[in-house]
Amino acid sequence: MTKEEITLWQKIEAFQLDEPGADFKFSARLARENGWSLSYTYRVIAEYRKFIFMCCISESGVTPSDPVDQAWHLHLTFTRSYWIDLCKNTIEKDIHHNPTKGGAQEADKFDKFYTSSQTLYTDKFGTKPPEDIWHNNQQRFTDIDFRRVNTGRYWIIKKPRLSVAALTLLMLLIACATFIQAAEDYSMPLIMLGIVVAVTIGVYKWESDPNKSKGNQNGGDSGCSTAGCGGDFGSSHHGGHHGGHDGGHSGDGGHSGCGSGCSSSGCSGCGSGCGSS
């Protein structure tokens, strides 16, 4: 890191997301909303700080891992902490979170951003990102079928792995074969057997298809682009983060990023200096 980067990182590292004296702190909320242990949550928050640092220094674009993205989403709802304490008073830059426009070109862009993010991480922090937080590219952009579920009303049962499913299918086949031997009319058992086999094969072919979530991927990729949107570490662009660009950035309408809907400006992802707070 350069001297300026070291100073910036020290400020971000010292930034506190948990409000002192609060009964329900940021970390506790993040853990509850994602079903994480507190120890894992604290590690995700540490990675979120590193992500914010990379947003500030990247010359191209930065895309967070999904756990880091969840920390980012939640922090955005703490508006005073995010826009005033972090963006204005700590890093002196606005880091925006806007939606991708979708499509193959956007998907390819964010895939490259995610790869470059991990390279930048290794370069600046001297170690590779932790794999249980920064998942590989395929998992990052396909393992995204998440829903908000009321666990007080619904049970959440983990889908069986292929080996378990294969054992279950084998048991069903044995049961069907036994039924066929005992039956005088073979047509109905054979139809049942065919349906079981067809459904099982169809489900697991779909489960194993890396492109099955492509539609969701195009709607859920996220990133942070600083190219053309911000200045040096010391630059500060403030004034109304819902109001769009300042005069010097009105032509940056082509950038795209990830989803919060907080800004009407065209700058993307976590674009520094694109609009004001």
Image (cartoon, helix red, strand yellow):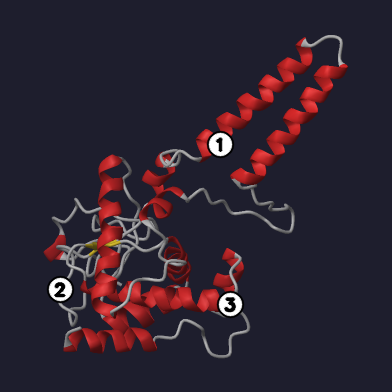
Nearest to viewer (mark 1 / mark 2): 1
Residue type at mark 1: give it: Tyr
**Is 213 above or below relative to 2?**
above
**Is 205 above or below relative to 270?**
above
Q: Which residue is mark 2?
A: 231
> Would you say residue 115 is visible in this rendering?
yes
Q: Dot 3: few (<14), some (14–19), or many (≥20) neighbours within 10 Å? A: some
| Quadrant the C terminus occupies | bottom left
Q: Nearer the viewer, residue 109 or 158?
A: 158
Residue 127 point in image, percent of width and height = 32, 76
| Residue plotted at (45% across, 76% down) | 45
| Residue plotted at (33% across, 43% down) | 102
Residue 19 point in image, percent of width and height = 51, 85
| Quadrant the N terminus occupies | bottom left
Q: Earlier in the sequence, mark 3 or mark 2?
A: 3
Q: Real-space Cα distance between discs 3 and 2?
A: 36 Å
Nearest to viewer (mark 1 / mark 3): 1
Q: Please state if 198 lies on the left or on the right of 91 as rendered.
A: right
| Tag 1 secondary structure | helix
> Do labels 1 and 3 touch, CB within 8 Å?
no
| Residue plotted at (70% across, 58% down) | 151
Residue type at mark 3: give it: Leu
Q: Which residue is mark 3?
A: 38
| Tag 3 secondary structure | helix
Residue type at mark 2: give it: Gly
Q: Nearer the viewer, residue 218 or 182?
A: 182
Which numbered circle lies on residue 204? 1
